[in-house]
Amino acid sequence: MVEESAYWVAWSQISGIGPVLLRRLQQHFGTLATAWNATKVELGEVEGFGFQTLEKIVQQRSRLHPEQLFTKHQQENPYFWTPADADYPRLLLETPSPPPILYYRGEVELQENLGQKPLVGIVGTRRPSEYGIRWTRQISTALAKNGFTVVSGMAEGIDTESHAAAMKAGGRTIAVLGTGVDVIYPQKNRDLYKQILTAGLVVSEYPTKTPPDRTHFPRRNRIIAGMSRAILVMEAPLKSGALITATYANEFGRDVYALPGRVDDYPSQGCLKLLTQGASLIVKELDELLTMLGAIPQIDRVEQLSTVQQLNLPTLSPELQQIMDAFACDILPFDLIVQQTGMAAGSVSSALLQLELMGLLCQLPGMRYQKS
């Protein structure tokens, strides 16, 4: 039997099918394996699948063999996750456009992937002032010493300072690249890259040997925002890529913090704009910032219900109980419930509605569910 992961790889090879359409495809059919065998008419029922896209699918799908493609892909890129894998970063999976393939190198820490260890993104300009550098180092150091993993993009400037300071403090860091995970960019960060491989991870949605491309970096910013529980913007002019990361963070429901600066400082203009739009202020008292970040809910293992709570639970049918048993963490997206239960998407949808009416589950934005 061909694994679901193989279908994520196969679908990602079809031109014109990006992360958003793949997400819709999976939600519509329940699994990408089912979608692979769907007819042209059935595929046409999915939002965003127009005539030209359907023609590309029909032409290319006939030439691809998921199992063979997956084996070849593993040989060329041995370390990667797809949304079908249990180790795929949970927070990233909650976003509307999770990468169909996420490549990685370095030391994996499962608690980070499961959302049980907090990840905080730090982004900013490639040309920071001494003020921005000083605060980036102070905050990254404080985060690392208090058990947070620092996420950034390994670009020059603020990114480089945040990675280096976190590791110097004995913490972990994750670099999200706009190249393949084996391509170092910029070259001056070669030593930093080697350090990160021993004290964290480098990840990318691009396969090995992919060179830098200016279109890749804005796209990778959604991964920084998606993996993190909060984004700290240290210094950013009005046209900085850091503001793109902040925009994604807002769309994903993440907290955004900005470092204030003087109104006439060019590197601070983007941060000041974020503050006027509702971003939280990065305060001088780092203990206060750490307290605010620590108050962000984590995806923890669900504690066992007390005896009294268990007695008050209604008797559920096997199908409804199977849905409830799937909730090993606080929040689950619809497609992951389908995957974990092995039930048809229609059956899961019906069962979720019943459980909502019984007051056992509640629906969140983005087709996500949590226990009431």
Image: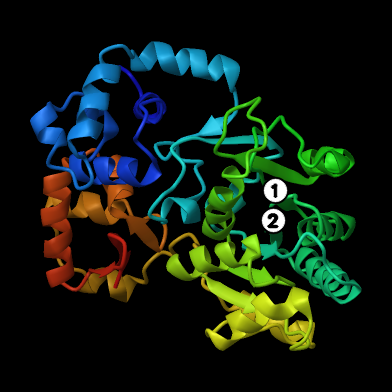
Write the residue at 71% across / 39% down: 107
Look at the picture and state if 288 lies above or below 169.
below
Give the residue type that dot 1 points to. Answer: Ala
Q: Nearer the viewer, residue 91 or 43?
A: 43
- Residue 338 visible? The answer is yes
The C terminus: image quadrant: bottom left
Q: State the image coordinates of residue 24 (x, y, percent, origin top left).
A: 27, 46
Q: How many marks?
A: 2
Q: State the image coordinates of residue 111 (x, y, percent, origin top left).
A: 60, 52
Q: Nearer the viewer, residue 54 or 120?
A: 54
The N terminus: image quadrant: top left
Residue 152 is tagged as: 2
Q: Which residue is mark 1?
A: 175
Alpha carbons under labels 1 and 2: distance apart: 5 Å
| Marked residue nearer the N-terminal end (1 or 2) | 2
Mark 1 neighbour density, 10 Å: few (under 14) some (14–19) many (20 or more): many
* Label pair 1/2, CB-CB below 8 angstroms: yes
Kindly indicate the quadrant of the structure image that contains residue 120: bottom right
Secondary structure of the residue carrying tag 1 is: strand
Write the residue at 56% across / 68% down: 246
Write the residue at 67% across / 31% down: 211
- Residue 253 visible? The answer is no
Residue 340 is tagged as: none
Look at the picture and state if 290 lies above or below 13.
below
Mark 2 neighbour density, 10 Å: few (under 14) some (14–19) many (20 or more): many
